[in-house]
Image (tube, grey):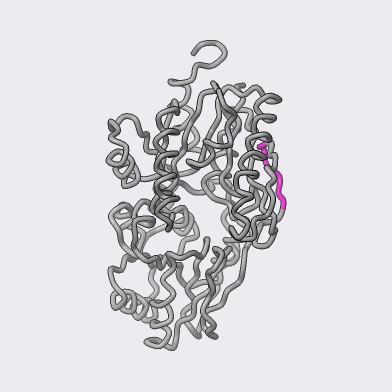
Amino acid sequence: MQKMIYLCPVDWRWIKQRPQFLAEELSKYFEIHAVYPYQNNRKGLQKKSDSPVSVAPCFSIPTFGGKLSALNSVNRGLRRQQVSREIREVQPDCIWVTMPWQLDWLPEGNECPIIYDCMDDYAAISMVQSERENLIRQEREIIRRAKVVFVSSENLRRVLRERHHLPEERLVLLRNGYNANWTRLEEEPAVHEGNLKIGYFGTIGRWFDFPMLWDSLAENDEVEYHLYGPMERGIQVPVHDRIVYHGVVEHDELQHAANDMDALMMPFVINDIVCSVDPIKLYEYIYLNKNILCIHYPEIQRFEPFVMFYESRDDFFRRIRDLRRSNLMKYTQEQADEFLARNSWQQRAAQAYDVIRTQIPTEDGK
């Protein structure tokens, strides 16, 4: 079995996302050694759990939210040393990279084949012009050096092609998926006679449309929102008796939390970041067998059979009123199962492996 060093972008115990799911599924094809940036503040992380992946923390000196930015170059050097040591010890056949700035983690003269998995439009995420320009430079260089470049959405593929003047075949679409290892609960969904309970699972960041939720509570006094997940630094959940923040929930417990909800939602503000997102939560929401409220944008039009899209604030209010009157499911279990069978992380990892083996020969030359 070939060996792969997998550079994870987040602490391994951060809310489970594409990096952890793909690494675990790719371990069926590679001996995976994941290197992750150890989060010095351990708040908001999930409990330690068993994994088929060998994981190694990459330590850094705290910069206290960037206040000690002079330490950034020191931390880059520390991470390069740690990754270099991992490369020497593992002797990998390839290196999976997940962020443009991880280029700085690799030792000079690295000749090990690189696979770049681009999950987001990082230049759009950055709010500082100088950082944005540096990210674009790093992005261009890592794409140039990579044997394979995966992108998580069609819009992201379009953005990168136009930004870096790339041929279409240079970027391989590898969408997100859902965790097919879940076992369906036998317990019956909760039945509520009071308020309509709408849940959200995932990171709570600057893209979250809190003003719309706040206004909807004034418009309808029979709805309440339940939020589960970590918060980005600087983000605060508004204080309201019908907005309940539960904190981080273990991924295996999502089903139990969802079972107590009447519907699930993805209330995002449309911007360049969101337009390139193929949301993992929509796949998981479908599995959780609840009606889904979601802002509409072109990338997720294919979810239309399962999602109640809204286009505006007033449209969202109307959807809430409709659910309050009748919460009949938009889709059947059979439709959900058919869709999910084509969109599991196992399927994504198999697709990635098929692409990789055409570009990076195995030991027997195949």
Q: Compared with residue 43, is residue 1 higher up or lower down, i.e. above or below?
A: above
Q: Is residue 256 magenta?
A: no
Q: Is residue 49 magenta?
A: yes
| Label tally | 0
Of residues 40 and 355, the one drawn nearer to the viewer in this rendering: 40
Of residues 344 and 330, the one drawn nearer to the viewer in this rendering: 344
The answer, for residue 110, to whether it is visible in the render is: yes
- Which residue lies most toward the front here? 70
Picture coordinates of residue 148, whole percent (x, y): 43, 29
Q: Which residue is drawn at 30% across and 58% down?
A: 297
Picture coordinates of residue 26, whole percent (x, y): 56, 34
Please name the predominant secondary structure of the magenta segment in the image: loop
**Residue 241 in which image quadrant:** bottom right
Picture coordinates of residue 29, whole percent (x, y): 57, 28
Picture coordinates of residue 152, whole percent (x, y): 41, 44
The answer, for residue 334, to whether it is visible in the render is: no
**Residue 64 in which image quadrant:** bottom right
Q: Which residue is drawn at 56% across and 45% down?
A: 9
Q: Residue at x 37, y 34 (%)?
A: 172
* Range shown magenta: 48-53
**Residue 102 in which image quadrant:** top right
- Which quadrant is home to the N terminus? top right
Q: Compared with residue 265, is residue 112 higher up or lower down, i.e. above or below?
A: above
- Which residue lies most toward the top here? 364
Of residues 351 and 150, the one drawn nearer to the viewer in this rendering: 150
Image side of residue 70 versus residue 273, left or right: right
